[in-house]
Each structure stands twice: as structure tokens, then as C-alpha cells.
């Protein structure tokens, strides 16, 4: 018996598993997936989205994006909203790397400007942005600094010279979510986080130099300041060991509470606390602290990238534009208002491997994106590249303003290594013309394009479902893997 | 090193056995260090010791594994040999550990995996007559 047997296809981009298909479901599961992606989706990840539908206080649907794959507790690519009064919050619904996200920096450079010097430029950035194993940053912080970062997020970075004030409105939640509390964060988390600000990390984190290879929506592209052959930088990283430790701490403490109450869960990583409880509040405040840490981390790295590019081309900010387009989170729980059955409700929206996708006119958007919608940043694999999209209007009532976050894995890291033994992946990367730098060849092998779904299928699905609309396609010329 | 690598979408798991709790936790700790860095170039020039107390064996497994990740990430210590004392007292699981190793040196120690967290995902602990076994997954 496969969970896919419960699928009821609604249209080309959406299937549902109706409430009642599996015992204990409180709501329907909605999976945005086309027929091609349906063939390769893992049953485990579908089971996980069904498990999420059983959680107390879940509102409307348990939702999965087309890049869904199995995670810890919630699947990656999962979205679930809970009533703040009657619902829950779950560390498994946010993920270990709290506020893992993507930042896009646009430049006034074109592909032709950098093609002859890509190796030198990429190497320079590689040296300036610490990455890889246990990478420590060059920024020395005290515990008090870290406490201020928990409260201020990217604003701390800007106040300390890492960037400009006008960048704040180009970051989701203006680079700082209210409610972070360092008293809810363990000493171990501080110990892990203190030396990692301004570092990329390892695994699937990366920094990519791309050019815009295709424009789908000229009008929005112009409003975003994007043009064909333009060089943009995509940066993917999060809250590093700080967020991981917070997730680890609260999974353990919630597990202990579950045992006291003799509650049974289908998956231990699905532990939760009522959002309105003391434990739920403490996790939320710690999670916000880690989210702010990640906003600060990407702000500092963005500043380092800008400084490096300006130095490399011996240019001033007047002559060479290196500007933030947008910065999004894709592992987070946010408090947002939605109209449910005609009534306004305040919900805690969990997005785990899912990107916020506010459409034009949304009240929380800054004026610069009010008449376009927010930029949605979706990386793909290191050869196929990614997309910049804009929030789609249907996302409001279909997915709590959420869309996909990437291509989504199809091979485990071990399978990727096994695959690489049969194929010369370095030759393949070399032949593609993309320059890849990493502290470790193993990381490159684990992150080969074959380990990921076809990002074009994922984008076609979210476009077809109206969750977000493609603006431009990106192709990499140089990649730094963490 | 006596452990088996397990497959999982995205991340990495291990299966570790021991003939008693002492042997099990020593093998677990040594296996995690071996997952992080190649053990053969690690020498012994320092000892890191501490203890943990948890309500269940599963919590102790996860906490101990995360402690090793933390020791590598924050204290930059790589272990060569790990020795433990284990007991169950007042229904609580108590583990004292000593890690014999040295400071991480990237020019000397080959890093294999960057483990970020040990998880409860598909966590298994089996207490058989002849052996004890753990299956544990890590977020990378």
C-alpha cells in the first residue's frame, strides 16, 4: 500500500489526499505536484505530510510544495498553519537550520564583463567569505553582541557598518522578527553561534554567480531592476550551529513533556507544544532569535560580497552597482493573518523548505514591492541554475502565501556519492562551463545535479498553480559550495 | 571503525553495536568522531571529560551524540579513543565520558562529514541478549 494510492488529482498541478483517507487526519492534504514529479515523489514524504494533517489546531490543509522530499518530522517542502489560540508550534515544522534562506544581489555587470575573470573573482570571494567545515568568521563577537543580534537581526549588522539602511526593506520581515528572547536560548547555542556570523557553512549552502539567461516577465523584471545577461549573486545559508542547537534543545525538551503526558506521535521529530503554552512561547522566541541571527549572517555575507566585487573591479559604488534585490527565509514559523471561512484569523504559519510568496498589494510588503509582489528566490542545482519569481495571487488562499524553495533532492548524499563513482561528475561540471570551488570535493559530489529534481518541473508547477510567477531564469557561471 | 552507514534522503545515518552499554556508547562516540574526521591521523594530547544524565536511553543517545558534535564544532577537539562509565540510577541513565584526542588541525585531519545535529528521526535502540544496537540519523 502506497500513500500515493490516496491521491485524487484535482488538476494538472494539484492532488489532494482527502481527510479520512488515513485515520486521524484533521484536514485534507494538498500536494502541488505535476504528473512528472508525481512519478518520482517518495512515499515517505507523503506519509509525513499526512502525519502533519493529524496535528492539533491545523487550519485548512496540510500542504506540500512540488520540491517535497522527506525531512525530520515535517517533509521538506511542507507548509502548515495553526491557530495561535488552539494550535501548536513544532520545531520539526521549521527545521534544524532555522531561517535557512536565500539572498539575491544584483549588479550592473553583464556576463561579458566577468567571463574572462570569473576564476579570479570567484577565488577572491571564496577567500573573503569563510565556508566549509567548522568555518569560523572573521568577525569577533561577544556574547552581548550575539544577544543584540537575537533582538535586532540584520539591523545589528547595518548599525555596525555591514551594509546600508535602505537594504532593510529588501529583506523579508525587514530583517528582524519581533519577539526574539535570548533567555530562551541555551549556552550551547551561544557557544556554537558566537564564531559563525558571516560564514557560509557547509552541505547544501552555496554562493553562486549567475547571469540572467531569459526574461519571462519584462515588466516585473524592469521593476526589480533585472535585465538579460545581468550578473546576480545568489547566496544560500542560514543560522548555522546556533539554529541547529536551538532546534536540538527544543526537540529534546518537548519530547520530555510528551512523555510526561503519555502522548504518542507517529514520528518523534513531530513533537510540538501548544503555541499559547509557556513551552510553545519559549520555542517561538528562541526560533525568532535564530531567524534574526540568520538575517544578520546573510546581511554580513552580502556586505562582504559587495566589498569584494567593488575592490576586485577597483570601482566605486557610483560606477558599479552591487545592490540587494531581496532576502527570503525558507525554514521558519511566522505569525500572519488570513481570512478563513470569512473570518480573520491569526495563524502561526510553518514553512519548512517553502518560501513566502506575498503577491502585489499585500499589506506587509514595503512600498517598493507593493505593486509587483515580493521577489521569490528559487535556486536549482549547480549547473541548471535557478529562477527569480514574484509572489502569485492564488498563494493567498491556496498555500498561506507560500511557494517552493528549490529543486528538492531525489538522491541521498550516499546515493549521490555512489552515482559519482560511475560517472565523471567533475568532467560533467567542467564541460558545463560552470566553475565550482569548494573546501571539499566530497561536498561537490554530494551536491551533483543528478541529486536534485528538475527545477523546471518544480517552477512549471508553482506557476501553473498560481503560487508564484517566473520573472527571470538564472544560469550559473561560478559556484562556491560550502 | 565498526559501524554501518545508512541511507537517507539528504542526510546520513549509522548503525552501531556493542556487547554492553559501555561498549555501545564507546563505539557510538568513536564512530561519530570517525564520521567527522579520518581517525588514523589523530593523536592524543588532551583529554575532554564530562557527564550526562537523561530520563531515557534514547534521550541519552541523542544528547551524547550532539555533545560530540558540539565538542568538535566549538572546542575544535577530535577524538581518537573514547572511554565511558555508564549506570542506571533512580531510573535515570547516567554517562561519564572521557575523550582522548587533540585539537583539530585542518592541515592534518581529513574531514569526512560535517554533522550538524543528531536527530530522533527513525532512531532505534535494540537491547538484545547478546548485543545492543543503535540506528541514528544526523542532519548535515
Image (spheres, coloured by chain):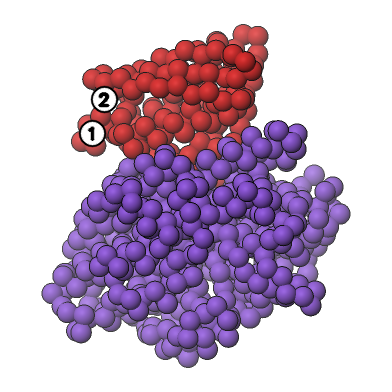
Chain colours: A purple, B red
Which residue carries the number 2 mark?
B102
Q: Quick one: label 1, few (<14), some, or many (20+) residues within 10 Å?
A: few
Residue at left 26%, top 21%?
B46
Instruction: Report the front residue among A104 and A439.
Output: A104
Q: Quick one: label 2, few (<14), some, or many (20+) residues within 10 Å?
A: some
For the residues bearing labels 2 and 1, Cβ distance under 8 angstroms = yes
Residue A398 makes an appearance in the image: no
Q: Looking at the picture, how far across and down is residue A466, in whole percent?
A: 64, 77
Task: Indicate whether A422 appears above or below A432.
Answer: above
Task: Indicate whether A43 appears above or below A321.
Answer: above
State whether discs 2 and 1 lie on one chain: yes
Q: Is residue A45 left or right of residue A102?
A: right
Furthest residue in direction bottom, as rendered: A219
Q: Chain of mark 2?
A: B
Label 2 and label 1: CA atoms lie apart by: 9 Å
Q: Looking at the picture, how far across and down is residue A294, in whole percent?
A: 41, 58
Q: Looking at the picture, how far across and down is residue A414, in whole percent?
A: 48, 40
Query: Quick one: SS at disc 1?
Result: loop
Which residue carries the number 1 mark?
B105
| Quadrant of image for the N terminus of chain A | top right
Q: Is residue A398 left or right of residue A332?
A: right
Furthest residue in direction right, as rendered: A20
Q: Quadrant of residue A404?
A: bottom right
Amino acid at each position: 500500500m502506497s500513500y500515493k494510492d490516496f491521491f485524487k488529482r484535482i488538476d494538472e498541478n494539484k492532488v489532494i489526499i482527502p481527510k479520512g483517507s488515513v485515520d486521524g487526519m484533521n484536514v485534507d492534504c494538498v500536494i502541488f505536484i505535476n504528473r512528472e514529479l508525481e512519478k518520482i515523489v517518495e512515499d515517505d514524504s507523503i506519509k509525513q505530510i499526512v502525519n502533519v494533517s493529524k496535528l492539533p489546531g491545523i487550519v485548512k490543509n496540510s500542504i506540500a510544495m512540488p520540491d517535497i522530499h522527506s525531512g525530520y518530522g515535517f517533509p521538506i517542502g511542507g507548509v502548515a498553519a495553526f491557530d495561535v489560540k488552539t494550535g501548536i508550534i513544532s520545531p520539526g515544522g521549521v527545521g534544524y537550520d532555522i531561517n535557512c534562506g536565500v539572498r539575491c544581489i544584483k549588479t550592473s555587470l553583464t556576463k561579458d564583463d566577468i567571463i574572462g575573470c570569473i576564476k579570479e573573482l570567484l577565488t577572491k570571494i571564496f577567500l573573503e567569505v569563510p565556508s566549509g567545515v567548522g568555518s569560523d568568521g572573521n568577525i569577533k563577537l561577544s556574547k552581548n553582541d550575539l544577544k543584540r543580534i537575537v533582538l535586532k537581526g540584520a539591523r545589528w549588522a547595518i548599525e555596525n557598518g555591514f551594509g546600508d539602511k535602505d537594504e532593510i526593506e529588501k529583506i523579508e520581515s525587514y530583517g528582524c522578527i519581533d519577539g526574539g528572547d535570548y533567555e530562551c536560548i541555551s549556552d550551547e547555542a551561544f557557544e556554537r553561534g558566537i564564531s559563525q556570523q558571516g560564514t557560509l557553512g557547509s552541505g547544501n549552502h552555496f554562493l553562486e554567480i549567475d547571469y540572467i539567461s531569459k526574461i519571462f516577465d519584462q515588466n516585473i523584471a524592469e521593476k526589480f531592476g533585472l535585465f538579460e545577461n545581468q550578473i546576480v549573486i545568489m547566496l544560500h545559508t542560514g543560522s548555522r550551529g546556533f539554529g541547529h542547537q536551538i532546534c536540538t534543545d527544543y526537540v529534546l525538551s518537548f519530547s520530555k513533556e510528551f512523555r510526561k503526558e503519555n502522548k504518542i506521535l507517529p514520528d518523534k521529530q513531530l513533537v510540538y507544544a501548544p503555541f499559547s503554552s509557556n513551552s510553545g512561547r519559549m520555542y517561538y522566541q528562541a526560533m525568532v532569535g535564530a531567524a534574526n541571527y540568520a538575517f544578520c549572517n546573510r546581511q554580513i555575507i552580502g556586505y562582504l560580497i559587495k566589498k569584494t566585487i567593488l575592490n576586485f573591479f577597483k570601482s566605486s559604488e557610483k560606477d558599479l552597482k552591487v545592490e540587494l534585490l531581496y532576502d527570503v527565509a525558507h525554514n521558519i514559523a511566522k505569525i500572519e493573518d488570513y481570512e478563513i471561512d470569512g473570518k480573520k484569523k491569526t495563524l502561526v504559519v510553518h514553512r519548512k523548505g517553502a518560501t513566502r510568496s506575498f503577491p502585489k498589494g499585500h499589506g506587509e510588503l514595503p512600498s517598493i514591492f507593493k505593486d509587483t509582489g515580493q521577489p521569490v528566490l528559487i535556486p536549482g542545482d549547480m549547473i541548471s541554475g535557478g529562477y527569480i519569481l514574484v509572489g502569485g495571487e492564488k498563494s493567498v488562499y491556496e498555500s498561506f502565501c507560500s511557494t517552493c524553495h528549490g529543486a528538492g533532492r531525489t538522491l541521498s548524499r550516499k546515493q549521490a556519492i555512489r552515482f559519482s563513482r560511475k560517472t565523471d561528475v567533475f568532467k560533467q561540471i567542467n564541460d558545463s562551463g560552470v566553475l565550482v570551488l569548494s573546501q571539499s570535493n566530497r561536498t561537490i559530489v554530494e551536491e551533483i545535479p543528478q541529486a536534485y529534481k528538475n527545477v523546471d518541473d518544480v517552477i512549471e508547477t508553482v506557476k501553473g498553480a498560481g503560487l508564484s510567477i517566473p520573472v527571470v531564469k538564472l544560469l550559473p557561471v561560478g559556484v562556491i559550495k560550502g | 571503525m565498526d559501524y554501518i552507514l545508512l541511507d537517507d534522503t539528504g542526510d546520513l545515518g549509522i548503525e552501531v553495536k556493542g556487547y554492553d552499554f559501555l561498549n555501545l556508547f564507546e563505539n557510538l562516540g568513536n564512530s561519530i568522531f570517525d564520521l567527522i574526521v579520518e581517525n588514523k591521523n589523530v593523536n592524543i594530547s588532551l583529554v575532554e571529560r564530562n557527564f550526562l544524565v537523561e530520563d531515557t536511553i534514547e534521550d541519552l543517545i541523542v544528547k551524547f551524540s550532539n555533545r560530540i558534535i558540539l565538542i568538535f564544532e566549538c572546542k575544535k577537539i577530535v577524538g581518537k579513543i573514547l572511554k565511558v562509565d555508564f549506570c542506571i540510577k533512580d531510573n535515570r541513565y547516567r554517562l561519564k565520558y572521557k575523550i582522548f584526542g587533540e585539537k583539530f588541525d585542518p592541515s592534518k585531519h581529513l574531514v569526512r562529514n560535517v554533522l550538524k545535529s543528531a536527530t530522533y528521526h527513525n532512531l532505534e535502540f535494540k537491547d538484545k541478549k547478546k548485543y545492543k544496537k543503535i540506528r541514528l540519523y544526523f542532519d548535515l
